[in-house]
Structure formats: C-alpha cells, structure tokens
Image: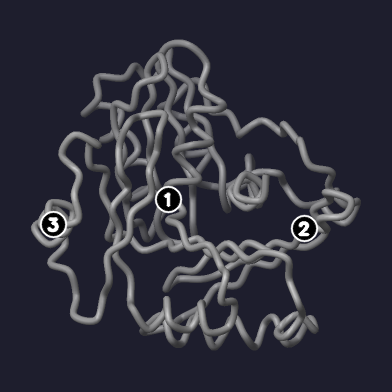
Amino acid sequence: MTIQLALGGLSYALLDDTQKRLIGLECHQVDAIDSNEVFLFLERALDAKGLNNKALKSVTCLIDERTHLFVPESLASEQSNATFLDFTFRIPEGYIQQTDRIGTIQAINAFCYPKTLKDRILTKWNKAKITHSSTVFLTSCFEFAPEGKVVFVNVRNRDFDVVVVNDGKLLFHNNFKFNTKADFAYFLLFALEQNQISNVETPVCFSGLILPNSEIIQLCSRYIKYLVFVEDRHVLQVSKVFDDVPYQYYHLHYQALR
C-alpha cells in the first residue's frame, strides 16, 4: 500500500502483490490543523474498508509537506541540510529531518515533517518506508522526459508542483499555492517566464488531481499551446475498477508501487 499524506488531504492505493495488480485507490480532502488529525482521518478511512488492521506486505508513506529542498550531493550533510532547511522554512518545533537520494540529479531531497507523524506511522507499520512525494514525482519526470525542454505539473487540491527538465537536467522545481484558476495560470506562466520557456513551443505535462476539461486547463490553454497529460505507461496490471479513473489521478502512487 502507498499512502500520500498532506494537511489538505490524503490518498492511498493498494497493490495485489501476487498478481502485480493495482486494485484500489481512494482520495480524501481533509480540513485538518495538524498531521495528527490527518492520520486519524486515514485510520477511519482504512477502517471503513476493513484495511485498518490488515496485514500488508509493505507500506510506503509519501510525505507531502512543502518544507523540502534539493541539495547537491557535494554540499549535503546532516548539518548543512538542517541549516538549509531552517534558513528556507524556519523549521517548526517538533519537526524532524529526513533525506532521499535522487541519483538522476546527484542531489539529496532534504525534508522535514512532524516527529509525531513518523511515530504514528512506524507504530502502526513498523517497517514502513517513508519518503517525500516530490522524490517520486521528480524521478518520474526524468523517466518520462523527452529530449529538450519539458515542463511537468503535479496538481493537488490547493497547490501544485512545477518541474522543468532540459535534456536530462533539472532546471527548476517549485511549489505554488492557489485559490482560483487565475492564480494557477498566473503562477504557471510566471514559472515559464522565469525559466525563459516558450509557451508556444515547450510542452507542459500534467498529472495529479486535474482533468482535461477543467476550468484550469481551459484557461491555461489560452496562453500555452501544448498542454498534455502524463502518458499511461502501465508496467503493473490495473484492475478494471480503474477504467473510469483518469491515470493522472494515481500516477504518483503507481510510480511509488513499481
């Protein structure tokens, strides 16, 4: 099972490991003030499906905190990572630091999240793997990126990530909050302008909680010529119950389960 946890919502996906088949997915919007509330909501959601105390071969938790940054391996160390994080975000009290290595860019994804959340996860699933959602997203961007420049956008309920890749090199990564479709279009166009990216030549590839006929896409299409959605490149089998679920909705879970 993979679980994606954020203050604005959570989702989880189930894989039948014997058949290598994706068999379940649920997404929930959660109005929570802290990660403890999110985790309690997760337990109630799992309990409703009879999964709360079910034995699982493996559990991967994707932390969706915005408090993360990429550090070149040559500069990375426990102390320097903590210094960079605190300088950028003013690490809240009770948060702990963790790192993921991203070999494709020879960098460390340093992130922090509440220690209470880690304790809850490992108390419930003592062998759970904990990683940052942006690690999975960025890794998938390099897997799917063609030659030249391409922009990847991963959408959540009220924020989105933008990644710019050029010939296998990371040029840009940032996260933007939005309240309206106009906010979304403004920040996306701002990211393109900052990176001197042509909005008539460079493809922008979407994944996450967004549909091709959404108002956001309709607005963005006025200014960006090539809007595409992440390709459905299934390696695992997918249950027929997903026939009506857009692939981009579970793209990150699918990548984390592979």
- In this rendered view, identify the residue nearer to me: 19 or 185: 19
Q: Is residue 23 left or right of residue 114?
A: right
The amino acid on which the numbered mark 3 sits, given as a three-letter code, is Gln
**Real-space Cα separation, disc 3 to disc 2, in angstroms:** 37 Å
Q: Which residue is mark 2?
A: 15
Cβ–Cβ under 8 Å for marks 1 and 2:
no
Instruction: Give the residue at x 46% y 87%.
Output: 37
Q: Earlier in the sequence, mark 3 or mark 2?
A: 2
Instruction: Give the residue at x 24% y 37%.
Output: 73
Disc 3 is placed on an element classified as helix
The amino acid on which the numbered mark 1 sits, given as a three-letter code, is Lys
Give neighbour class at mark 2: few <14, some 14-19, many 20+ (Cα, 10 Å): many
**Real-space Cα separation, disc 3 to disc 1, in angstroms:** 40 Å
Q: Earlier in the sequence, mark 1 or mark 2?
A: 2
Q: Position of residue 109 (x, y in %)?
A: 32, 47
Q: Which residue is mark 1?
A: 181
Count the marks.
Answer: 3
Q: Which residue is mark 3?
A: 79
Which quadrant would the C terminus be assigned to in this image? top right
Q: Position of residue 197 (x, y in %)?
A: 31, 19
In the rendered view, would you say 77 is above or below 165?
below
Q: Is residue 199 left or right of residue 210?
A: left
Disc 2 is placed on an element classified as strand
Instruction: Give the residue at x 41% y 19%.
Output: 168
Q: Which mark is residue 230?
A: none
Nearer the viewer's eye, disc 3 or disc 2?
3
The amino acid on which the numbered mark 2 sits, given as a three-letter code, is Leu
Give neighbour class at mark 1: few <14, some 14-19, many 20+ (Cα, 10 Å): some
